[in-house]
Image: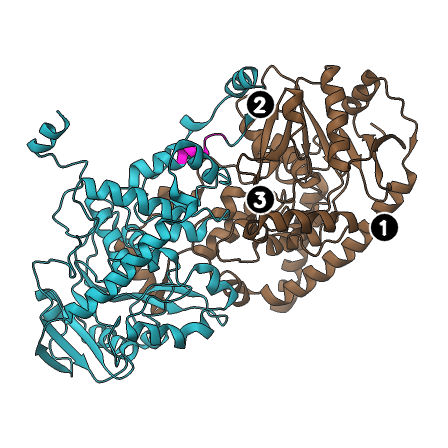
Chain colours: A cyan, B brown
Amino acid sequence: MQEPLPSRRDRMTKVLRLDKSSEDGLRELLRFLLEKGRVKGVLALRRMGEHGAMSYSLITNPDHIDSTVPLFPLMPVNLAKQLSRLTLMEPAGEPVAVVLRPCELRGFVELVKLKQGSLENFLFISSICGGVYPLEMAVTGDIGERLAQYWKAVEQGEVIADIRPACKACTYFVPYTADITLSILGNKGIDKQTVLFLNTGKGQKFVEGIPGQFSEEEPDSAALEEIRKAREAEREKLSDNVETKALGIDDLTKTFSRCIDCHNCSKVCPVCYCHVCFFDSKDSEHGPVYYETALEKNGCVNMLSDTTFYHLVRLYHISASCVECGLCADVCPANIPLWAISLKVGDSVQKAFDYLPGRDTEEGLPATAYTPEEFAQVE
Amino acid sequence: MAVTQKGVILAAEEGTGKGILSFLKQALSQSCFDAVLVPARVAAGDSFAYFLVQDEAFLEEASPLPPIMTVQGARVISRLTKRGKGKKRIAVVMRPCEARATIELAKLGQVDLENMTLITVDCPGVMPLSDYFKDPTKGDEVFKDACQAWNSKPMRPACRICDKFSASGGEDLHVGTLGTGSGKILIIPRSAKGEDMLNKLGIPLEGDISAWKTNVKSLTEERKKERKQANESLRANIEGIDKLTEAFSACINCHNCMRVCPICYCQQCNFDSDKMKFTFGDYITRAEASGSLTVPTDTLLFHIGRMLHMSLSCVSCGMCEDACPTAIRVAQIFTLVGDRNQEAFDYVPGRNVDELLPLTTFEQEEFLEVEQSYAGASAKQERQDD
């Protein structure tokens, strides 16, 4: 049974209120941090082109904060991967405020455990997340017309129609390990007031002196539990989907038979970090002898024969750390319901180890941690 | 060889696909080759993949002209022969752009053609993957109707402006269907290898192909015009750094365009390598230069770098655009740039395997052209200085 709220060393008890809509309030906070020199840069979603393409941007000039859309319901990339890119060679030398979604933060925590980046000097600002729309809808321009409806549903704490299936099924919408948490989902009045939980000493220190009201209060656990239950129901419904009902080898082979072997699911995955994937390496290249031997044996060879193998190995590698962001399914040119498969497999692996990826920066990866009881269990 | 004016007319009452399969079966049984590489439906029935087949029973199930291109055929041949040729002689049935890409890969040392016989088919185009996968059953119907009418509307944007949909040079045999009338296909030898095969089968080259040639010519002219128009109107939208940046602004840096591209063959792309990894300080310095830095970084640089590397060999197959998660018009942009670059070198990728890649050849006149343009520019400069 999942706890209604993330257990954390720093409880969500300190609140900062700004008398502005949530997005304006968040921008004000970001501008404050840059102008006061508390941070060197801000990393947030920003509107890029005339046609409304969205991209993350590392901003050092406070004047550029106006063009940010930190709460726009789209995840063009999982920011975990980009944070890893920024800090792979060295930790951030100066403080940077990062606005990201709970699953992005969890993904980055996993990458840090995997030694692919550093948490140092980041101020993490996350939100109680309503979910994001599929990338496809950014392209067709369908998000714009849904925005009003999106925010209304967010206020009501409803499961939002048309968002990524992975988001509909997400029960981890309250961020773990964030320094500051913006309360939006289920918060009636987000167009009038910005409510920020200052979870850590770091979060409290960075906002010192900002014009706003500070108070001590607890989040509405009952309301959050209601939302979690609704998501849980959605999760069960979606994972009962016939396409992934049977995970036997025949069904899996069928599900993956549409795979075009592009490996884009791995390229966008926040926790697939190998510099060169085994399946892109020379070790996965077969000479003509391999194909001709199989041809002699079977009379027929599928030239994309390793696709199921690829997906199984990927699941094997990432399932303990999969944060269920759903980006893999979003970018799949063959519409394979990868999110559902990862969700099923990830869930069972994570439950077996009582592990939730990104829950705690100090918690070791299951495959790297060993407790004597585990040995007894196996024995 | 001088391309023959004659071909073989074969009956294909059950459609082009079955007609081609029946020819392949005959050739396979008479040992013209040992196996066939041909697209076929996958187990789940909702997609297609290339299969290497030597049993006639399996061949029966093949779909020589599937409604979608899941993987560019040139990549499949490269997968099979990159490490050298095998023992078996293989006939490959593919679309003209796949054959052209195969020829380019052979020039780039990524394909061994020695044991391969390339058989191309007049191509009505392929549907975008996203359209087809929404409802494969409906997709099959839409494609069937579109093929019969040679209606390119449901096809990839790249296919709609394709002017090399028929025999285009590097193939050994070509299957003509355009205007041959229903129930008939033409098998046209396009190389000595192809002609030998028909001789071996004992099929005399007696069919008149002039009507087919006229049809191909007229559709080619029509498509050339459409292509030129499409290129011009696209050019107005993407020319200059600001418009180009806008055109690629939705790029999520996944590099999937590169990974499905038949020409992009590097084992490791420069843009995925350590060379493109920077320190945190570098990123901050870049952000400070203009106040902000788009993350992921260097997306436009990637596309321009890719363009520089492969546009001379780009066959405009449209795979890149189909695989792009944010529907950037990659194939259309690369077609525009590719056409202009190829024209500058009077080069047509895949036309002839013996034709060298422009960047690997040098002609004295080229040097003069460059020298003169510099000479002209410096003379002009001198005049201005005076």
- Amino acid at the residue labelled 2: Cys
Please say whether residue A14 is visible from this viewpoint: yes
* Mark seen at residue B218: 1
- The magenta segment: A305-310
Dot 2: chain letter: A
CA separation, marks 1 and 3? 30 Å
Residue A325 in view (yes/no): no
Residue B236 vertical position relative to residue B69 in the rendered view, above or below: below
Q: Tell me residue B342's x, y (percent).
A: 68, 47
Are the residues under badges 1 and 2 in a single subunit?
A: no
Judging by the rendered image, the residue that carries numbered circle 3 is B310
Q: Which residue position is annotated with label 2?
A: A300
Tell me where residue A80 appears, x and y as whole percent: 29, 53
State the image quarter where residue B91 is shown.
Answer: top right
The tag earlier along the polypeptide, 1 or 3, is 1
Q: Nearer the viewer, mark 2 or mark 3?
A: 2
- Identify the subunit bearing mark 1: B
Q: Is residue B289 left or right of residue B261?
A: left
What's under tag 3, amino acid-wise? Answer: Met
Residue B272 x %, y %: 40, 44
Q: Amino acid at mark 1?
A: Ser
Q: Secondary structure at mark 2?
A: strand
- Which dot, 1 or 3, sits closer to the camera? 1
Using the image, name the chain to which the residue with label 3 belongs. Answer: B
A75 horizontally vs B37: left or right: left
Of the residues tagged 1 and 2, which is closer to the observer? Answer: 2
Q: CA distance from mark 2 to mark 3?
A: 33 Å
Residue B235 image offset from top left, x and y in percent: 64, 63
Disc 3 is placed on an element classified as helix
